[in-house]
Amino acid sequence: MEKVISGIRPTGNLHLGNYFGAVKSFVQMQNEYQCMFFIADWHSLTTHPTPDNIRNSVRTILSEYLACGIDPEKAPIYVQSDVRPVLELYLYFNMNAYLGELERVTSFKDKARTQPDNVNAGLLTYPTLMAADVLAHKADKVPVGKDQEQNMEMMRLFARRFNRIYGVEYFKEPESYHFSAKAIKVPGLDGSGKMGKSEGNAIYLCDDEATIKKKVMRAVTDGGPTMLNQEKPEPIRNLFTMMEIVSDKQTYDYFNDQYNNMAIRYGDMKKQLAADINAFCAPIRERILQYRADEDYLTRVARQGAERASESAEQTLREVREIIGFRK
């Protein structure tokens, strides 16, 4: 069975975009692949979070993964910092990574532009830590979006370079895994782009009913169509896309017909959309709160996940040390 590994930075709650973009597929994949999922708290240090923020975010993400249906017996969930062999492998990859190629990574250049006062070494070497996270377990596939494809290319480069330097065929080159030919892109509430934490346009899985309604009712709209069967502008198209995801077909078709006939009342549409989003989120929200309240269970899940991940990474590290020439 092929190995699949994926991680998420603990920078806040999961939102609908996370769920439909990745987590829903993770739940399906755990029955088809040998999956491992981790919470990338080392990666989060590039933004200098407080200790309390790290601890709370890790517990929150873990609760949300479980609430969405990931079974830790099928797919271990572990915290990145609990698997120490990854750090040593990160060091070895850094020794064979070059400044020029790291500086050309698009995600680094974007971060350096948007946070010029915090261009730290962790940002620069993000691709090598990502490579260590994955190659430590000799994963076959990594579920990623298009924004991570360059980092995947770097990962394959580091694997090839290690093999070439030491004259071995040890690391295989993991493939990017795309969930479907047409991935679901959940739009944000601000009328443009995709849903995201940093954009402030997200509905979170743990949002209560009142919060969901407030956010949806403030979503961007326009003055309404001025012609029959008028093409929808982006803000309105985004609302319909969201309704297509969470509402039943009859509801979607009703409001679509209302729009095409120039009879749409956006207030009514938003109220229905808010109700449908809440109906979708409510059972997940309830499970999140149950898991979040059981600290002992969360600790046990993280510890068992770390034990399984550490066993895998330690085996890789022993072999890598021998290849390089260090004692086992």
Image (spheres, rainbow, N blue to C red):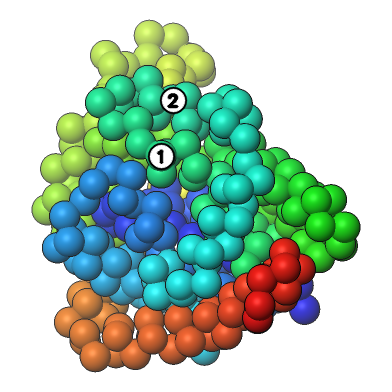
Residue positioned 70% across, 60% down in the render: 141
Q: Is residue 251 left or right of residue 162?
A: left
Classify residue 173 as left or right of residue 41: right
Given residues 191 and 80, the one toward you in this image is: 80
Can residue 182 be seen from the camera position used here?
no
Q: Quadrant of residue 173?
A: bottom right
Q: Amino acid at mark 1?
A: Ala
Position of the C terminus, as image quadrant, is bottom right
Q: Nearer the viewer, residue 218 or 115?
A: 115
Q: Residue at x 29, y 85 (%)?
A: 299
Label 1 near label 2: C-beta < 8 Å? no
SS at mark 1 in the image = helix
Q: Residue furthest top?
A: 226
The numbered dot on residue 110 is: 2
First reached walking from the N terminus: tag 2 or tag 1: 2
The picture places residue 134, in percent across and down from the top left corner, at: 61, 61
The quarter of the picture where residue 207 lies is: bottom left
Q: Is residue 93 above or below residue 89?
A: above
Q: Residues within 10 Å of mark 1 (few under 14, many from 20)?
A: few
- Is residue 16 shown to the viewer in this render? yes
Depth check, front residue: 67 or 145: 145
Residue receiving disc 1: 121
Q: Residues within 10 Å of mark 2 (few under 14, many from 20)?
A: few
Relative to 77, residue 166 above or below: above
How far apart are labels 2 and 1 at the CA level?
15 Å
Residue 5 left/right relative to 282: right
Residue drawn where x is 28% and y is 32% of the image:
118
